[in-house]
Image (cartoon, rainbow, N blue to C red):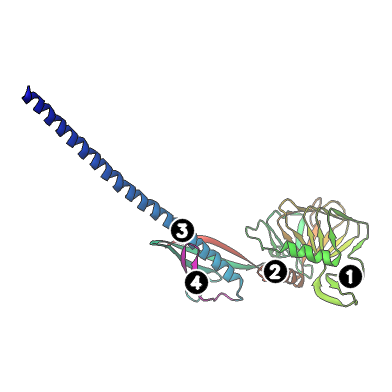
Amino acid sequence: MNQRTNNEKGSILVTTVFFVSLLTAAGLTIVVFTQNSTQLVSSDVGVKQSFQVCQAGIEYAVRKSFNTNNWHWSATHSGFSGGNVDVTVEDSTVIAALKDTLQVRVTGTAGSASSKQMFRIRLSDISAYAVYISGDLNSKVTVRDSDGTPNPARAFDFATEMPTIDADLLRQISISQGHYFSSSYSMPNNGIYPSPPDSGFYHVRPNGTVSDTPNVVYINGDLEVKNGAQIAGIVVVTGDVDLKNSQRVNGILYLPNPVSVVQDVDLYNKESVYGGIIGSGNITGLGNPDKISVYHIQSYLSKFYGLFNQSGLPYVAFYRFWREY
């Protein structure tokens, strides 16, 4: 009996030791797994942070490219939230094949993780275009040089990059000049706006002298320009523009909304814009070819971009991911 009891006690002890050992091993495995998982998560966070830092470096390079009048600017090492970035800029003086393109190498680091990316940036002087829109320009519209010669190269539609125009500043100036419309505006036949003597592209001061500030007309709605009417300055239209029967826009039509449409609504006469059409809408001529003519006026376009493009320059940057290196 005693021998059997002793055997049972010994069996229980062995079983207990086995389970304790098993639990200890399982605990150690969990600790090691948790440590490895923590390291993997930490590494993943670091990789994401380094990628984000790299993106910040690219954005920096684009902004820097806007703020120079040539392709050459010094590379930099900068700190960003979460890490650091090194920017190396190469152009045709470094790699002849780049021509008018900047190649930007960016290394972003966050902790021990890093991301290396290469982008190519091309600045385009959009004041060379009488029409620069993200929408469609149909075949009924003719784009011309200032002397009236048809020149399709003055048109750029379906643009993927648009200038950052300060629409709020345009609105403020229009209010200060008394040219703000809170809703749609329809010009009467043979009407002139702004009224003489303030009827040209440039605004007239109270003493009657012409300033170097354009008239700014801001229409929070649709614009209708009827038979023989004329409107001048920088004309901002948040809705559609209807041009009717030999009217004239002497300046810039700026369309901030992609739903906007510039169209002629008469089948017999031709409508003219002397300056340019910029923005996110579409331009649609109806009826016979050559229904809307847009004449390239460089001085108007340069003034528009110089005052209201947030870079202060008539440039947009086309940049794309090239590869990792």
Magenta span contains residue 76: yes
What type is the residue that disc 2 sits on? Ser
Residue 244 x %, y %: 87, 55
State how far apart marks 2 and 4 are (Cα): 26 Å
What type is the residue that disc 4 sits on? Val
Residue shown at 78% from the left, 64% from the top = 172
What type is the residue that disc 1 sits on? Asp
Judging by the rendered image, the residue that carries numbered circle 4 is: 89
Crowding at mark 2 (Cα within 10 Å: few <14, some 14-19, many 20+)? many
Mark positioned earlier in the residue sequence (1 or 4): 4
Judging by the rendered image, the residue that carries numbered circle 3 is: 49
In-image side of 125 versus 31 (left or right): right
Mark positioned earlier in the residue sequence (1 or 2): 2
Q: Nearer the viewer, residue 136 or 323?
A: 323
Residue 150 x %, y %: 75, 64
Mark positioned earlier in the residue sequence (1 or 3): 3
Select label 1 or label 3 by which is in front: 3
Visible residue check, residue 250: no
State how far apart marks 4 and 3 are (Cα): 22 Å
Q: Quadrant of residue 23?
A: top left
Give residue 127's mark: 2
